[in-house]
Image: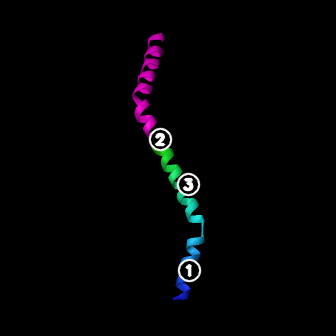
C-alpha cells in the first residue's frame, strides 16, 4: 500500500505531463485561430483569386 501511495505522490510531482498538456492546449488554440481566420477570410480570398484569374485570362 505504501508503494502505491509513493508512486502516486511521485506522479503528482512530475511536471513532464503538465508541460505536454500545456503544449497541446497551445497547439489546439493555434489551430482554432487558423481555422477561424480561414472561415472568416475564405470568401474574400476566393474572390480575390477569382479576380486575378479573370485578369490573367482576359490578358491572354
> What is the CA distance from the residue labelled 1 to the residue labelled 2?
39 Å
Q: Position of residue 59 (x, y in %)?
A: 48, 10
Q: Residues within 10 Å of mark 1 (few under 14, many from 20)?
A: few
Please tell me whether the stretch drawn in magenta is mainly helix, strand or loop: helix
Q: Residue at x 56, y 80 (%)?
A: 7
Residue that extends furthest to the bottom in the rendered view of this protein: 1
Instruction: Identify the residue position indicated by label 1 in the image.
Output: 7
Say which label, 2 or 3, has the lower sequence index: 3
The foreground one among 42 and 23 is 23
Is label 2 in a helix, a strand or a loop? Answer: helix
Q: Is residue 44 above or below residue 35?
A: above
Instruction: Identify the residue position indicated by label 2 in the image.
Output: 33
Q: Position of residue 26 (x, y in %)?
A: 53, 50
Say which label, 1 or 2, has the lower sequence index: 1
- Magenta extent: 35-60
- Residue 23 shown in magenta: no
Amino acid at each position: 500500500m505504501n508503494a502505491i501511495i509513493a508512486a502516486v505522490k511521485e506522479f503528482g510531482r512530475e511536471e513532464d505531463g503538465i508541460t505536454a498538456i500545456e503544449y497541446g492546449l497551445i497547439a489546439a488554440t493555434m489551430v482554432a485561430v487558423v481555422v477561424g481566420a480561414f472561415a472568416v477570410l475564405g470568401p474574400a480570398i476566393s474572390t480575390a483569386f477569382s479576380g486575378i484569374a479573370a485578369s490573367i485570362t482576359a490578358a491572354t
